[in-house]
Amino acid sequence: MNENLQDFASLAGMRVVVTGASSGIGKEIALECARAGANIVVHYAQSKEAAQAVVDECEAMGVQAQSVQADFLQSGCDPLAESIWNESGPIDIWVNNAGVDLLTGAGAKLDFSEKLEKLLAVDVSACVHLSRKVGRLMQKRGRGTILNIGWDQADRGMEGESAELFSTAKNAVMGFTRSLAVSLAPEVRVNCIAPGWIQTEWGDQASSEWQSRVLQETPLKRWGKPTDIAKLARFLISSEAAYLTGQVINANGGAVR
């Protein structure tokens, strides 16, 4: 093996904050960044034990890791970036992954208005405020990277209540990404991943009808895995993607519908 290949998309010595990193896509992004040599801050809202498990996995790879708690539904998120920056040191990379689960558990039983309120608070407002806060700190420092999470069907349209909700929120995130990238350039890069059908908790429980639909709509004929998103995230936040900013990258197995 060419030893130089081991350095591709290296994040050695970087401090990376991943919101919503106790499970799912956020967890895999945190672990992938640790594999790349980054020191990790694992944000969680309620799952302290799960977050600590992610911290333990990161530390087992020889990097520094810590967890921080903040419930974006219960309190303002503005102090989070500044407190991490002041207590742990400058943040090189910030990943806005935190999102409300409206597809499984108690969230699925809420009415439309309640779902919308929670979705806007966590997926949109927290993303915007945190990005602006940490972005200004990065800009003043002279470097930094922000990565947001959108949805590949948000700007194409899909039927159903959940699609209406998520398209509202994720279109906001994707549009915000493009504008913030211009505001913070050239010091800070801002990009967004728009996942397609990813097999998180909802995917594991999806009916046979949905399982068939996913395969039918995806040219690669499989669900995406959280690790697929994590590996793309590692590339986008690394120096290998130094000429990419303001981009929304679909990670959806080739789906075009």
Image (cartoon, rainbow, N blue to C red):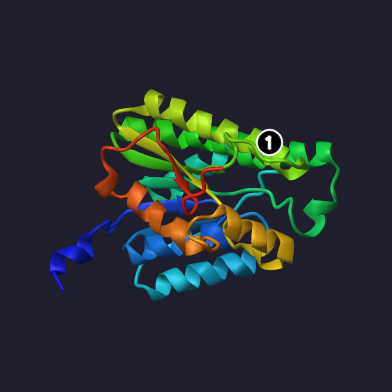
Give the quadrant of the C terminus: top right
Q: Residue 145 location in percent, x, y?
A: 37, 41
The reply, left or right, for residue 166 in relation to residue 250 is right
Which image quadrant for residue 212?
A: bottom right
Dot 1: element: helix
Q: Residue at x 37, y 55 (%)?
A: 234
Amino acid of disc 1: Leu
Q: Residue at x 39, y 47 (%)?
A: 93
Instruction: Answer few, some or many: residues within 10 Å of disc 1's Cα (few below 14, many 20 plus, some between 14 and 19).
Output: many
**Placement of 174 over or under 199, stated as above or below:** above
Q: Residue 96 location in percent, x, y?
A: 52, 45
Q: Residue 118 location in percent, x, y?
A: 73, 41
Q: Residue 133 location in percent, x, y?
A: 48, 33
**Placement of 61 over or under 233, stated as above or below:** below
Q: How many marks?
A: 1
Decide which of 69, 88 is in the foreground and name it.
69
Q: Is residue 91 visible?
A: no
The reply, left or right, for residue 75 in relation to residue 172 is right
Q: Is residue 223 visible?
A: yes
Q: Which residue is mark 1?
A: 120
Q: Residue at x 30, y 32 (%)?
A: 187
Give the quadrant of the N terminus: bottom left
Q: Residue at x 48, y 73 (%)?
A: 56
Which image quadrant for residue 103?
A: bottom right
**Placement of 47 over or under 195, stated as above or below:** below
Decide which of 49, 197 is in the foreground and name it.
197
Decide which of 8, 188 is in the foreground and name it.
8
